[in-house]
Structures are given as C-alpha cells and as structure tokens.
Image: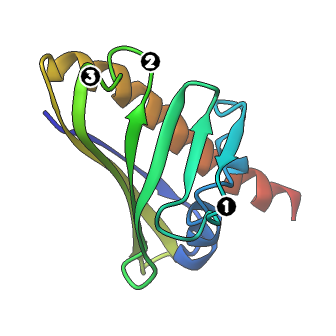
Amino acid sequence: MPCYNSIVVDAPIDKVWDEVRDFHQLEWGRPFITSVTAVGEIPGDRVGAKRVLNGAFEETLQELDESRYKLSYSIDEGPEPVSSASVSAYIGSIRLLPITADDATFVQWTSQYQADNPQLVADFLNPIYAALLACLRDYFQNQTSED
C-alpha cells in the first residue's frame, strides 16, 4: 500500500526546489523536524547522502533529478512500524510540478514499500508527510508575509 500526500505551495517551483533538494537541510520542516544529522562525507545534493531525522529515521538519498524536480530516498532504519525488521524496499519520493496559472508549486510526496502490515505503515507515515507538507507551505507563507 503506497502513501500519497500533496499540497499547493504559493511560491515558484525553483524557489521551492531550492529548499527541498538539499537532503541535509530541512529548515522548512520546523517545528516538526527537530534535528537533521548528516552522516558521512557525501553532500546533501548528491546521491548516496545519508541523514538521521529526529534521532529516529536513518535515510539515504537515492535519486536527485534536477530536470524533473524530484528526489527519492530510502528509509534504512526507523521506529516501528518502519523498522528494517518490518519494512523493506522503502522508497519515498518528493516531486514538484509547476502551477503556471499563478506561479505556484504542486508538491506530492509518495512512497512505496513492502511490509507485513502495509496499512499500519501508511497510517503511521501519511500524517507525518501531511505535517511536513504543511510545514513547507507555511514556510513560504511566512517568507511572503515577512517581505
């Protein structure tokens, strides 16, 4: 069972991409993301970059496609129900699409995985992704109000 979440961000696609493309930078995810620890020497804009989110989710950047405004990552280890003992072949993706009518951005966050209880995984992850997308939207709303 895949996860799917989406939101419209009132900002041009290039500005949104500049924020989400660096795997080691999640300022836009605050207050939901409380810590991002880069692991290893690979920069956050290179495939193979590793991070630990909130001390609990170990992730690796699997794809960074600048022309398609898309990144994909694996969850290598995490709390139940997304631990490596419960989930395999997890790939999450963030994809941006331009909304040309008003220079906004459609952001979709999807994931595919194999699990003994796929609904339990979806029920755990979907609220996390929805909260992070709301943080991204609010990040740009706050920037606009400060201008």
Q: As drawn, which residue projects farthest toward the front?
A: 40
In the picture, the quarter occupied by the C terminus is bottom right
Q: Earlier in the sequence, mark 1 or mark 3?
A: 1
Which picture quadrant has residue 16? bottom right
Q: Nearer the viewer, mark 1 or mark 3?
A: 1
Q: As drawn, which residue projects farthest toward the bottom?
A: 67
> Which residue appears at 27% of the width and 20% of the height?
85
Decide: is 145 above or below 2.
below
Q: Amino acid at mark 2?
A: Pro
Measuring from the top left, give residue 57's x and y in whole percent: 51, 31
Residue corresponding to mark 1: 41
> Which residue appears at 18% of the width and 38% of the height?
2
* Badge 2 vs badge 1, beta-carbon distance below 8 Å: no
Residue corresponding to mark 3: 121
Q: Nearer the viewer, residue 70 or 24?
A: 24
Q: Nearer the viewer, residue 117 or 69?
A: 117
Measuring from the top left, give residue 134's x and y in whole percent: 54, 40
Decide: is 113 above or below 141.
above
In the picture, the quarter occupied by the N terminus is top left
Q: Nearer the viewer, mark 3 or mark 2?
A: 2
Q: Is residue 125 left or right of residue 54?
A: left
Label 3 crowding class (10 Å Cα cut-off): few <14, some 14-19, many 20+?
A: many
Which picture quadrant has residue 37? top right
Decide: is 17 above or below 51.
below
Label 1 crowding class (10 Å Cα cut-off): few <14, some 14-19, many 20+?
A: few
Residue corresponding to mark 2: 79
